[in-house]
Image: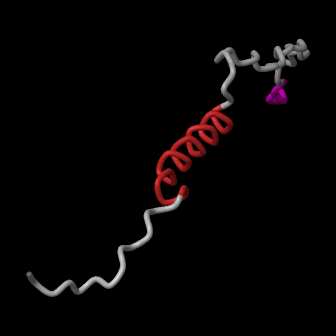
Amino acid sequence: MGVKYVLTEPAPPGWWAKNKVIVCSVACLLIGLYIGGGNDGQAEPANTPTPTTTPTPSTTPTRPSKG
């Protein structure tokens, strides 16, 4: 038989090493839903003021008479 170079077997990966991809994926999904609003998608209508027109008195320009 050959020489075994590994003296002891490495410890199995812990909980975080096994599940960090899943935990980060779920966290990013929740953050994305929070930023995106996560509501029913109906926005409130904008409060746009209606322009009001006030009549301006029309003045006819007068020319000085040639005299």
Residue segment shown in magenta: 62-67
Residue 66 is inside the magenta segment: yes
Residue 67's place in the image compared with 32, above or below, is above
Place residue 48 in its image quadrant: top right
Q: Between residues 42 and 35, which one lies in front from this camera angle?
A: 35
At x 51%, y 54%, the residue is 20
Residue 64's place in the image compared with 44, above or below, is below
At x 20%, y 84%, the residue is 4
Residue 53 spot, x, y in % from top left? 85, 13
Residue 45's place in the image compared with 7, above or below, is above
Q: Between residues 65 and 52, which one lies in front from this camera angle?
A: 52
What main secondary structure does the magenta stretch of the protein show? loop
Residue 47 spot, x, y in % from top left? 82, 19
Quadrant of image for the C terminus: top right
At x 68%, y 30%, the residue is 37
Residue 28 spot, x, y in % from top left? 57, 45
Residue 16 is inside the magenta segment: no
Quadrant of image for the N terminus: bottom left
